[in-house]
Structure formats: C-alpha cells, structure tokens
Image (cartoon, rainbow, N blue to C red):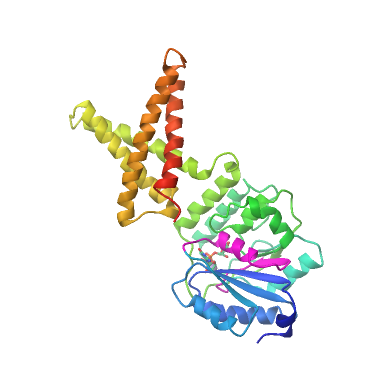
Amino acid sequence: MPTPLALGQAPLLAVVIPVLNEQDNIAPLVERLDATLAGTAWEAIFVDDDSTDGTRAAVAAIAARDPRVRLLHRIGRRGLASAFIEGAQASLAPYVAAMDGDLQHDEAVLPRMLAALRDDGYDIAIGSRYVAGGGVGGWDKGRVGMSSLATRLSRMVLRAPVTDPMSGFFMIRRTTFERAVRRLSAMGFKILLDILASLPERPRLIELPYQFRTRLAGESKLDAGVLRDYALLLADKLVGHIVPVRFLLFAAVGAMGIAAHLVVLRLCLSPFGLDFPTAQSLATAAAIVGNFWLNNIFTFRDRRLHGWGFLRGLVTFAAICSVGAAANVSVSSFLFSPTVHTTWWLAGMAGAVMSLVWNYAASSVLTWRRS
Ligand code: GDD
Ligand code: MN
C-alpha cells in the first residue's frame, strides 16, 4: 500500500484522528484516506486514549506496512480536544486536519480543504453541516436541538460567528494553529471553537459543506460529561484569563456548603431539639462532607477519587478545611481588632475569602493531586 511519496517526502498534510474504542473503523478509514488523498504526501496520526478494544492493534497492523500511519497512545488522559492538540504537535506537516475516527466525517472534503489553504490562502477550512449542501444526516430532534443551542451559546466567545463552530472536522495551517496553541483551554470536545476563540486575530475562514454520516460501528462518546466540559470551555474563554474556572466551581460548591450548613443547623435545632454546639458541629460536618462529595464529582471530576482514595481524600479535605477555618477566624479577628479596625462585614468577608483560597490551593495539591 505505501506510495513512493511515503518513502521520500515529508508529509504535507497530517490528519489527526482521536480514537476511543473504534477498532472496526480504523482499516476502512485508512483505505478511504489513501484513495481520497492519492498524490498528496499525507500522514495519519491516531491519538488513542487507552482504548479497551482492539483499536491500537488495528492501527499497529496497518502501520507495520504503511509508515504514513502513526499512533499516539495516551494513558490516564481523556478528551477529544487535547488529543487533537497533542496529535498535531507530534507532526511537523504544514497543514493539519482534525477528523473523527468513526467514518462520520466525509473524507472526500479533505482535498478541497487542502486546496483552500494552499492555493486560496485561507487559514482554516471548516467542514460545516449548516451551509448549503451540508447536513446532519440521521440525528434525532434532541441532538439537533442540543447542537443548535450549543452553537448559539458559542457566540458569546466568538468575535465572528461561523455556521458550525461545533464541527470536529476542519483543516488548519500549522502557523495559525501555533498562534493559538498556548492559549487553548484544551477542555472537552470542542477544539475548533477553542482555536477560534483563542486566536489573537481573525483568521481567513472558509466553510465547506459536508454531510454528517451515520455511525455504523462502535458507539458515540457523547454524554453528560461532554456537556459539562462544554460549559467549562465557554466559562474558561469568558473569564479564564481573570480567574481559573476550577476555582469558580470550588467557590460555587462552597456557597452551596453554606446553604447546606444552615439547613442542617436549623433542622438540628428544631425539630430535633439538639443544643447549639452539637447542632453547629453536625452542620459543620455535614457541610464538609457535602462539599467534599460535590467537589469530587464536579470541580475535580477529572481527578475523581474512589474507594479508599475517597475516604483518604475526605480526611485530608476535612483537615484542610479546619486549618482554613482557623485561618479565617484569625485573619478576620485581626482585621476587626481595635488596631486595624475594619468594618465587621469586610473583616468577615476577608476571612472567608482567605480560607476559600487556602482550601482550594491546599486541596488541589493534597486531596485531588494530579496522578
Ligand atoms: N482520543 C480520544 N479521547 N478520542 C475520543 C475521545 C477521547 O476522550 N472521545 C471521543 N473520541 C473519538 C471517537 O472515538 C471518535 O473517533 C471521535 O472522537 C468523535 O467521537 P464521537 O463520540 O463519535 O462524537 P460524536 O459523533 O458524538 O460528535 C461528533 O460531532 C460533533 C459535532 O456535533 C464529533 O465529530 C465531534 O468532533 C463534533 O464536534
Ligand atoms: Mn461520532
């Protein structure tokens, strides 16, 4: 199968293909690329996030006889966006395409994308389902509605809207990619949106229609986590340059903790009729456990703790919060003292913010440390 180009010529086009459990789609996809891109020096970089089926074996079997096919195997990582970024960076080709590994993207558009970049001077060619000639194929109403809502929300972060910023099918000039790469949020699924919102200047864009095909083999990876990642991407693009989005989540969970504390305190006092110190202790414990649980499934979802790790995490989190509470009290008492004499609510707020920052910093290092 290797063409003479594969032996002598550096690749002009890298097709980066994130894959997760796509074993049956690998061989047909490479065959289609080979046919469609005949005469072009291309390479395919499959970025696999530790699939549990035969995906890597399928890539390896082809790569053994075709040096244009390469594999990047990531362990302990997830996400279409970061998979694309790392695949693109593992190549030096001046043009880079992003394409799904499940045959839903129409490879026949690739030569037109390449011509638009190479001959017509565009920076990015987007495969769009929403320009004349494009379409979403067999999607149900729910998925169509979700996609159009996501597209509308994306306008918050895009200076110049495109019809299909949700597209995972596009080609970009490497120099353009490099102008965006250090500012990318690299969260979740929507790498094109991330790139468009990260570029310092407006790129020259062209949208080319394509029909989104129906998946034949394997399963979609779209789930609730993808929606959450999308919300985080938008938030990061909107305010991430001011405060980290993770910190905002941590603060939001903290605010819920205060509400939970008050509810439990009230219930313990009446109807349960406990004395105040006991009620306040129980409410504090409930708030700490509740916050730990929410932060574990929400704020630090990507480093989520299970089993014994969960218990150990709860203990460190409770210890960190106690130190935070002590710091809170001493800082606010100092500010409120006759020497400094700050108003009561400013002193109180300062103490609370101080413990929030401490709890966040310490728990992201100790409780939910990067593995
Ligand atoms: N490496 C890696 N890591 N690959 C992944 C991951 C991941 O965490 N999640 C999904 N993939 C791969 C899949 O194996 C597939 O090749 C491709 O990414 C797309 O995943 P699907 O789960 O099939 O996505 P979809 O069909 O729902 O979404 C498509 O439509 C969107 C437009 O609405 C994709 O084309 C998106 O790229 C596109 O944005
Ligand atoms: Mn798909």
| Residue 56 picture location, percent across and down | 51, 76
Question: Which residue is more in the foreground, 158 or 370?
Answer: 370
Relative to 226, is 55 above or below? below
User: Which of the 4 image quadrants contains residue 319?
Assistant: top left
| Residue 61 picture location, percent across and down | 54, 83
Is 99 contained in the magenta span? yes
Q: Quarter holding the C terminus?
A: bottom left
Q: Residue furthest bottom?
A: 1
Relative to 331, is 207 above or below? below
Ligand 2 shows up in the quarter that is: bottom right
Q: Residue at x 37, y 54 (%)?
A: 305
Q: Residue at x 59, y 78 (%)?
A: 29
Is 274 contained in the magenta span? no
Question: Which residue is more in the foreground, 236 or 45?
Answer: 45
* Residue 124 shows up from this direction: no
Q: Residue at x 43, y 54 (%)?
A: 303
Q: Which residues are magenta?
A: 76-103
Relative to 346, is 116 above or below? below
Q: Residue at x 35, y 47 (%)?
A: 293
Relative to 72, is 206 above or below? above
Q: Quarter holding the N terminus?
A: bottom right
* Image-based side of 74 in relation to 105, left or right: left
